[in-house]
Image: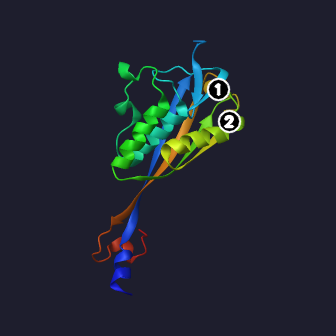
Amino acid sequence: MTTEHAEDRFMVPEIRVGQGFDVHRFSDDPARTLVLGGVAFPGEPGLAGHSDADVISHACADALLGAAGLGDIGMHFPDTDPRWAGADSIALLTHVVDLVTDAGWRIGNIDTAVVCERPKLAPRRTEICERLSSVVGARVSVKGNRAEQLGAIGRSEGIVCFASAVLVRPHAARDAGPAGPDEERGGQR
């Protein structure tokens, strides 16, 4: 093995995974627009929240922040701060993407699971995925799920979104010293 190849085996990408979660109830305000993943759903009741209450964008932002070790969405955009009243969640997500990439991370992908009885996501899924992917700079997948009439979400009182994000730091130098006890046994304990 050449010296160049020997050094390459100690250069491995650093990979982190973050989880995000958001939930909002439906608003009683008929003027409120439902926004999911940056896409408006005219004719559907909007979600209550300090910003536009886009549960998908919020869960994605939270997953990215968690994976990068940068706190959570509430730390960066507190609902007690009037600057964020009515904020466009795509703008918030764009800011989070900038924070994550400025910290040296590349976004691998984000996977989301949206739980709601309404609206049906399938007809707009491609549009939502494309909108989020363009903001994030990586693939974002959106899966629609129903709560099968169980609990508040099953009674159509709101929408929940779970998100998982993968971040990669392309080449993190690994300690090239002697193998530790776990490495000597193939990583098993």
In the drawing, does residue 37 fall left or right of residue 72? Answer: right
The picture quadrant where one finds residue 127 is: top right
| Amino acid type, callout 2 | Arg
Color style of the picture: rainbow
Residue 52 in the image: state x and y as whole percent: 51, 24
Residue at (56% x, 33% y) in the render:
38
Image disc number at residue 78: none
Count every numbered label the image shows and give the total.
2
| Amino acid type, callout 1 | Phe
Residue at (57% x, 42% y) in the render:
112
Residues packed near mark 2 inside 10 Å, few (<14), some (14 to 19) or many (20 plus): some
Residue farthest to the front, as pictured: 134
Residue 84 in the image: state x and y as whole percent: 40, 23
* Quadrant assignment for the N terminus: bottom left
Q: Which residue is mark 2?
A: 124
Res. 158 visible in picture: yes
User: Mark 1: which secondary structure?
Assistant: strand
Residue farthest to the bottom, as pictured: 1
Q: Are marks 2 and 1 in contact (CB under 8 Å)?
A: yes
Residues packed near mark 1 inside 10 Å, few (<14), some (14 to 19) or many (20 plus): some
Residue 159 in the image: state x and y as whole percent: 59, 28
Query: Relative to 158, does residue 109 appear above or below in the rendering?
Result: below
User: Mark 2: which secondary structure?
Assistant: helix
Residue at (50% x, 32% y) in the render:
22
Residue 28 in the image: state x and y as whole percent: 58, 12
* Quadrant assignment for the C terminus: bottom left
Cα separation, mark 2 vs mark 1, equals 9 Å
Q: Which residue is mark 1?
A: 41
